Image: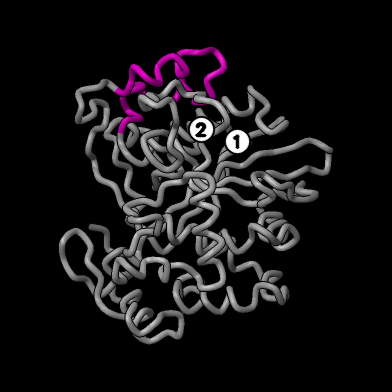
Amino acid sequence: MGRFLEQEKPRQASFKADSPYFSEIARADGVYKSKLRPFCVPLDHAEENLFPEIRQTALAFFASQRIKWHDGQNGKPNNHLCDSQVCCVNFLFPFADKPSALAELLRPVYPDLRRMLPIESGQYVTFEWIGQENYLGEKISRNGIRTRGANCTSADAAVLFERTDGGRQIVPIEWKYTESYYGTPLKIAKSGTDRTAIYRPLYMRDDCPINKTLLPAFDALFYEPFYQFMRQQLLAHEMERARELCADIASVLHIAPEHNTDFDRITSPALKKLDTKTAVCAWKKLAPPDRFMIVSTEKLFGNPALDQLPELTSWLKYVHCRYRWVQGE
């Protein structure tokens, strides 16, 4: 396990024990992978893993869109306080009905952002976005329904905005929290499926967004996080080709804590030849320069303009209390 995750576990356990955001019964240890753990809430109270002001609306939205909570049960989120999906929802869902605040958040990354546009069901942020079509040709369940958040490529979140030139841009967001990866090859799935066969048709196309001149071999991408990077980039490219939601540009935004240096590890042996210090920098060499953006969680949510928005006061207090590293602690 990564060092950052091991640091976060006691921090989150202390947050649960001492902050005013949990009921007394939710302060008890929660069962996770068959063991009681202080950094988890009881399963029956897993909704308390979310910022109080979004608990009911987030649960309702995920249910209405049939979005799967990772390791969640009974329509509730994961009870692990270090869960990445929960972290993403805690940070971004409060902006789902605040387009002006969302624009303030994202404009430092996208200076040509004019105004946010609703992306789904009137919301300005959506989650586990898989695209309106099966662009990557991934396997579909027997009932013909793709499940957002499970068994297919899903962007952790997505937003849509109008640019100053009048065009539309859709942004699939890849969110990281405590993740760390090692050199486990993923080319062959546990089922025996050769994953390269699924994505090779898109890779072989002339308009493939991946820089093949720098990539040692296609197989080099089948290590996390590069396997995720590849699928997200291909998904964004296909959405742009299809003009999804009338967008003329689709670009990936990668958000991760700079405090989580465990994520820096370059796990693919062949990609170490790119001579970069981090996995994200390695991918930036391979991705189209204007279709893959990187920003740290600390920089994005440390925007001073957010402190001046009264509608975010209670949320900022929660975030600064729970995820103290956002302020550099």
| Picture coordinates of residue 10, whole percent (x, y) | 29, 76
Towards the viewer: 298 or 143: 143
Towards the viewer: 235 or 23: 23
User: Residue beneath label 2, please?
Assistant: 233
| Picture coordinates of residue 293, whole percent (x, y) | 57, 44
| Picture coordinates of residue 316, whole percent (x, y) | 58, 75
Towards the viewer: 43 or 223: 43
Residue at 66% x, 52% y: name it: 123
Left or right: where 137 falls relative to 196 = right
Amino acid bearing label 2? Gln
Q: Quadrant of the N terminus?
A: bottom left
| Element on which disc 1 rests | loop
Crowding around mark 2 (Cα neighbors within 10 Å: few <14, some 14 to 19, many 20+) is: many
Residues under numbered marks 2 and 1 in contact, where contact means CB atoms less than 8 Å apart: yes
**On screen, residue 328 above or below 82:** below
Residue at 52% x, 20% y: name it: 208
Q: Which residues are magenta?
A: 195-222
Residue at 50% x, 64% y: name it: 90
Q: Quadrant of the C terminus?
A: bottom left
| Picture coordinates of residue 181, whole percent (x, y) | 29, 47
In reply to whether residue 206 is colored magenta, the answer given is yes
The answer to which quarter of the image holds residue 144 is: top left
User: Residue beneath label 1, please?
Assistant: 291
In reply to whether residue 286 is colored magenta, the answer given is no
**On screen, residue 50 above or below 124:** below
Crowding around mark 1 (Cα neighbors within 10 Å: few <14, some 14 to 19, many 20+) is: some
| Element on which disc 2 rests | helix
